[in-house]
């Protein structure tokens, strides 16, 4: 007699891992998009010039500026969504499409909130590559940048009023 439980265990974490793999392939396009969006009106460059500039400044790896923050965002956002949905499935009626949509909405909302800091850091890291090397902030890891971002973005954490953040990056 086989007493082994044949139920398959949820693998909610695989959603985060697969999402990080996917963002690795799309990150260069996101980098170009962010640089297009953050251009000033006076210094508008066409896409070809932006691509050439990224390559000249950083080579092939220049297209991956900010990838660690993108991975962080995907791992937190997607894993949170999948985990909450997987955990919540036991509490909703599987035949009720409205309940399942509500659960999915809740999981997506919480995942989105969890993923915002990674998204902010990603955009800032991607935008830094436009700056001259001497003007770029020095940081050794994502943690330093996210701590700085939190100080500037959240007046409650710094105990200060919310003045506009000087400079384009964290």
Image (cartoon, grey):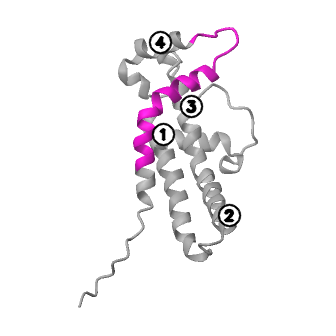
| Neighbour tally class for label 1: few under 14, some 14-19, many 20 plus, Cα within 10 Å | many
- Magenta stretch bounds: 18-46
Look at mark 2 in the image and give the residue it sits on: 102
Viewer-closest of 135 and 118: 118
| Neighbour tally class for label 3: few under 14, some 14-19, many 20 plus, Cα within 10 Å | many
Q: Earlier in the sequence, mark 2 or mark 3?
A: 2
Q: Secondary structure at mark 1?
A: helix
105 relative to 5 in the view: left or right = right
| Neighbour tally class for label 2: few under 14, some 14-19, many 20 plus, Cα within 10 Å | few
37 relative to 131 in the view: left or right = right
Kindly report which numbered mark, 2 or 1, lies closer to the viewer in this rendering.
2
Q: Is residue 33 magenta?
A: yes
Look at mark 4 in the image and give the residue it sits on: 53
Q: CA distance from mark 4 to mark 1?
A: 22 Å
In the rendered image, the vertical position of residue 142 relative to residue 43, given as above or below: below
Look at mark 1 in the image and give the residue it sits on: 69
Q: Secondary structure at mark 4?
A: helix
Q: Secondary structure at mark 3?
A: helix
Q: CA distance from mark 1 to mark 3?
A: 10 Å
| Quadrant assignment, res 108 | bottom right
| Neighbour tally class for label 4: few under 14, some 14-19, many 20 plus, Cα within 10 Å | some
Kindly report which numbered mark, 3 or 4, lies closer to the viewer in this rendering.
4
Q: How many marks?
A: 4
Q: CA distance from mark 4 to mark 2?
A: 45 Å
Look at mark 3 in the image and give the residue it sits on: 124
Q: Position of residue 88 (x, y in %)?
A: 57, 70
Q: Is residue 66 visible?
A: no
| Quadrant assignment, res 101 | bottom right
Q: CA distance from mark 2 to mark 1?
A: 29 Å
């Amino acid at each position: 007699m086989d007493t082994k439980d044949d139920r398959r265990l949820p693998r909610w974490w695989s959603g985060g891992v697969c999402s990080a793999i996917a963002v690795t392939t799309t990150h260069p396009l996101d980098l170009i998009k962010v640089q297009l969006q953050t251009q000033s009106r006076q210094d508008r460059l066409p896409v070809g010039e932006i691509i050439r500039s990224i390559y000249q400044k950083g080579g092939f790896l220049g297209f991956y500026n900010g990838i660690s923050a993108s991975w962080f965002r995907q791992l937190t956002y997607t894993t949170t969504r999948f985990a909450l949905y997987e955990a919540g499935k036991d509490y909703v009626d599987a035949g009720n499409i409205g309940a399942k949509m509500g659960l999915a909405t809740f999981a997506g909302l919480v995942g989105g909130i969890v993923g915002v800091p990674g998204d902010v850091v990603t955009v800032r890291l991607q935008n830094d590559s436009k700056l001259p090397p001497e003007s770029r902030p020095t940081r050794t890891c994502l943690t330093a940048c996210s701590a700085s971002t939190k100080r500037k973005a959240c007046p409650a954490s710094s105990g200060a009023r919310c003045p506009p953040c000087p400079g384009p990056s964290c």
